[in-house]
Image (cartoon, rainbow, N blue to C red):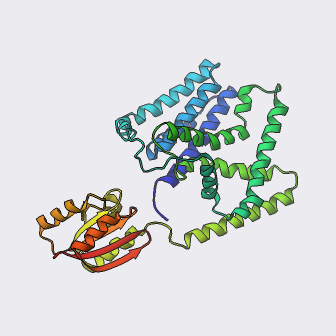
Amino acid sequence: QEARAYSILMLTTSVSFYYWYIILGSLLRREKLTNHIIAGYIFFSIISSYVHYFGLLFIVLQAMFSLVVFIRDPRSLFRLMLIFFVVFLAYLPWIPSMLVQLRRHKDFWIPDPHFFEMIVSLGNFAYKVPKWFSAIFIIPAYVYFALRTSRKIYRDKGHCSTREMFLSPDMLLLLWAITPFLVSYVQSKISTPVLTKRNLIIALPPIYLILARSIWVTQWKRVATAWSLLVVAGVGYSLLSYYSVVKKEQVREAVEFVVEKDKSLTVIAYAWHKGYFEYYFGKMGLDNKVSLIAGGSDDFVEMKNFLEHRGDKQFWYVAGCRKPKEEFLSEMNDNFELVDTIVFKKTSVRRYLVP
């Protein structure tokens, strides 16, 4: 219900994995690497890195895995590192900005994660189905995958090299699903919290592929077909339910209300930054409409002085994504006359008269 970079992130990381898997397989089999495969990987790796920091994390994890797997094959390792070096050069202009943003510490907006709560939360994020449905139709597939993979590793031990074992489809899917979660969890515990459900969208493709693989490797094809249809129907119904109910902040509707009522008045807003509202004001031809961000405990005096300096007799106050402090709202109601108000989903609009 919102346009963000996460869908593009999932697409570009999935495609980069596809090209990376082909590259690894070609090096393992001593086959020639084609230019379009190398170019495709470099292109989608660069896009992933710039779209989101978790896209960059994904590419770094691929580089580290490549280093470990081909450490005893200098020729293949050199070719791989050369590819990653090109990606690094392309990302170099953004590194100063990245270092500035990474200086945030424990006052960052993302809360400190709890391990098992995040696992459950990620599962709910991936499927959005009732718990009973997950317990009957989804969780057993992952249990079966874990047992099958463990049995295969034990059976193949001594018959294939460690490199071949790590490059098997099951192992790569497992590492793809688990490693981003573990790395971001450790990072969140020792430094800035970064672990959120949306950031872990890069792990959704292997989560879905593991489910599909677990179902279709069963020996009973009719059971697999029925199982697949039930999962698709359950997830599809949940998605339809999700998009039939408003869940996101209705910032656009709040801006439309302001513009329809009186777009000439000063707008004071409260959000993480002006961009939440400025984007929609700009779409309606009103650039730089938000004059001030205020809503914290100590913001009222600054806002009052701002209004006195401008000489405004009325103004709009819109709040979205963040809830103004109670003491701030109390002082607003004590000093100004509320003449119009409307509440949207996680967003509110108030018009005040200045005495």
Q: Is residue 121 left or right of residue 55?
A: right
Closest to the observer: 32 or 17? 17
Asked if residue 206 lies left or right of residue 3, the reply is right
Residue nearest the viewer, comparing 19 with 138: 138
Q: Is residue 90 above or below residue 231?
A: above
In the rendered image, which quarter is residue 278 located in?
Answer: bottom left
- Whether residue 268 is visible, yes or no, is yes
Horizontal and vertical percent position of residue 306: 16, 63
Residue 351: give x, y in percent of width and height: 27, 76
- The residue positioned 66% from the left and 66% from the top of the image is 236
Report the quarter where the C terminus lies: bottom left
Residue 22 image-quadrant placement: top right
Left or right for 66, reference 92: right
Q: Nearer the viewer, residue 78 or 99?
A: 99
Q: Is residue 215 above or below residue 13?
A: below
Place of residue 21 in the rendered image (x, y in percent of width and height, measured from the top left): 64, 37
Residue 110: image location, x then y, percent: 46, 50
